[in-house]
Image (spheres, helix red, strand yellow):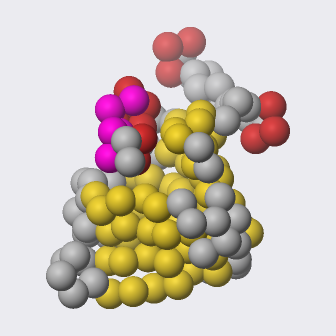
């Protein structure tokens, strides 16, 4: 094995969710983000009744509910597919599929995006902040 030049070395980074501040998007909805070069993971905290309005994005999304439940509406707003995602379940949302979600109870979910959500990183995600 050859030694990698300093410019090619990569460093692992350890994060602890509890050490990270929660970005309060609005009352009852917050998140913590960890971003790598080509993916992003988030803890999203919902109070019961919170709504993520209709939106879509080029990023593929995995939503893994750790606690609580989310009611998703997927596809055309006029005739959506409805899916309930409970603790221990994962929903795969393909690129550019319109969707919205409603928290059926206090919920913690893990969202994974590939590539990272630029709008979440630069704060231009007004669809979720302004309701």
The residue that appears at 32% across and 87% down in the rendered structure is 81
Q: Main secondary structure of the magenta part?
A: loop
Task: From the top left corner, tell me how far across and down residue 61 is, in percent.
Answer: 42, 61
Please report the bounds of the magenta region as a residue range. 123-127
Quarter of the view holding residue 118: top left
What x and y, as percent, mark residue 39?
47, 46
Compared with residue 87, is residue 47 higher up or lower down, i.e. above or below? above
How many marks on residues?
0
Residue at the top extreme, as displayed: 6
In the image, 100 versus 117, the foreground residue is: 100
- Residue lying at 38% horizontally and 27% vertically, measured from the top left: 122
In the image: residue 96, left or right of residue 120? left
Q: Quadrant of residue 86?
A: bottom right
Q: Residue at x 37, y 42 (%)?
A: 130
User: Where does the image place residue 37, in percent across and percent down from the top left?
Assistant: 45, 35
Splitting the image into 4 quarters, where does residue 100 fall?
bottom left
Report if residue 61 is visible in the image. Answer: yes
Q: Please state if 117 lies on the left or on the right of 55 as rendered.
A: right
Residue 65 drawn in magenta: no
Residue appearing at x 26%, y 67% in the figure: 98
Q: Is residue 63 left or right of residue 76?
A: right
Please identify the quadrant where the N terminus is shown.
Answer: top right
Q: Is residue 116 above or below residue 46?
A: above
The answer to which of 116 and 72 lies nearer the viewer is 72
Question: Is residue 115 among the parts visible in the rendering?
Answer: no
Q: Position of residue 55 (x, y in %)?
A: 28, 58
């Amino acid at each position: 094995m050859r030694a990698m030049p300093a410019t090619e070395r990569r460093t692992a980074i350890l994060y602890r969710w509890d050490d990270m501040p929660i970005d309060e998007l609005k009352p009852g909805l917050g998140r913590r983000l960890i971003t790598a070069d080509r993916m992003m993971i988030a803890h999203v905290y919902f109070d019961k009744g919170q709504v993520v309005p209709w939106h879509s994005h080029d990023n593929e999304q995995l939503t893994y509910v750790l606690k609580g439940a989310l009611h998703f509406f997927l596809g055309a707003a006029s005739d959506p597919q409805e899916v309930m995602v409970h603790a221990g379940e994962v929903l795969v949302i393909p690129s550019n599929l319109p969707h919205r979600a409603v928290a059926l109870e206090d919920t913690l979910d893990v969202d994974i995006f590939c590539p990272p959500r630029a709008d979440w990183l630069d704060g231009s995600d007004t669809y979720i902040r302004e309701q």
